Image (spheres, rainbow, N blue to C red):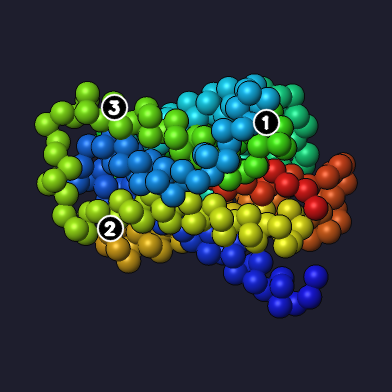
Amino acid sequence: MDTVSRIKAYACLTTAMVMVGSSVVVARHLVMNMPVFWALGLRFAIALVTMLPVLLRLIPKVRSHGRDLIVLLCQAIFGAVLFNIFMLYGLKTETAVIGGIMAGTTPLVMACVATIFYGEHLNRMAKLGILFSGLGIVLANSGTLFVQGGDVGSLRGIICIILAYVSEAVFLLMRKSVSSAISDMEASAVITLAGAIFFVPTAFVISPEFHVSSLSIAQWGILTYYGLIVTVAAYWFWFRGVSGVPASEAGAFVGVMPASGVIISALFLHETIRASHVAGCLLVAVGIVFAAGPTWQVPRWMRRGVREPLVVSEIPGHEGMRRRHH
């Protein structure tokens, strides 16, 4: 690959991760101004409008690939429903800074879930990555839970965010059970449809007192960003980039996500960034590099017993992502 093509691929991967990092900030803003289920229902409804042409292409495949569609619907339970419910309820009491930092641990949560439920082997680098990321999460949350005494609401918020990323890890791993006949965009369209079908009626039942007409133009703009940019555009940029570089290189760009989430939180939500947040974010990034980086980038004494690097090429927090090898 020539230098220009590689730079374009890197730019696409970086753009995708910045968009994903911003999703935590957008979600935090929405849940502070409207009911959780309405925020999610409108998000998926807006995204669904864009996905309608893709869904129409799926109609001829329904009969011959019914099993794949059933698996995708099961994925939707974890990726579209549980992930978003846990995440948005967690962000009601926890800051977007913390949510953004913890978002970077999704690849490592996937490794743990794969080990527990799929019996996959964790090599030495993956274990080091999990250790560093775990220390990063503890450090990032130390100001809230220890220095300031913490409270039940903060602890509940952190637990909800952790459960959100566990749900996302299960969702991403389930993608391996879907045949290649269903494209990534088609899978994303099915899960977006499932999310809209679940959240829109539920929003009317749980929060009937809320009226969409009460939303301001600015809030509609944020919802549109949440539905189109975070849900659709970030997905497109990621696979545009990941198709042009080795998966091991693409996986390292996951480290951009927690950093972008922290920076955007400070710029737009005016949340305070403490030294513990910065240090925690750096430890999470180091953990991602250990787990996703190619073995030749680490010291020789660490490579003993490493069979292959943990390759991560999924987008945390997005529907329809899957692992690609080059």
Tell me the amino acid under the disc marked 1: Val
Residue topped by disc 3:
201
Name the residue rendered at 71%, 78% in the picture: 4
Query: Are the two marked residues, 3 and 2, in contact with CB atoms closer than 8 angstroms?
Result: no
Q: CA distance from mark 3 to mark 2?
A: 22 Å
> In the rendering, at what x and y percent does residue 128 appear?
69, 44
Tell me the amino acid under the disc marked 3: Pro
Q: Earlier in the sequence, mark 3 or mark 2?
A: 3
> In the rendering, at what x and y percent does residue 177 appear?
69, 28
Report which quarter residue 121 is drawn in. top right
Residue topped by disc 1:
178
- Residue placed most toward the observer, 127 or 157: 157
Disc 1 element: loop
Q: Earlier in the sequence, mark 2 or mark 1?
A: 1
Whether residue 230 is visible, yes or no, is yes
Residue 311 located left or right of residue 131: right
Query: Are the two marked residues, 2 and 1, in contact with CB atoms closer than 8 angstroms?
Result: no
Disc 3 element: helix
Q: CA distance from mark 2 to mark 1?
A: 34 Å
- Res 221 label: 2
Label 3: few (<14), some or many (≥20) within 10 Å?
Answer: few
Residue 303 located left or right of residue 136: right
- Residue placed most toward the observer, 267 or 27: 27
Name the residue rendered at 33%, 54% in the picture: 224
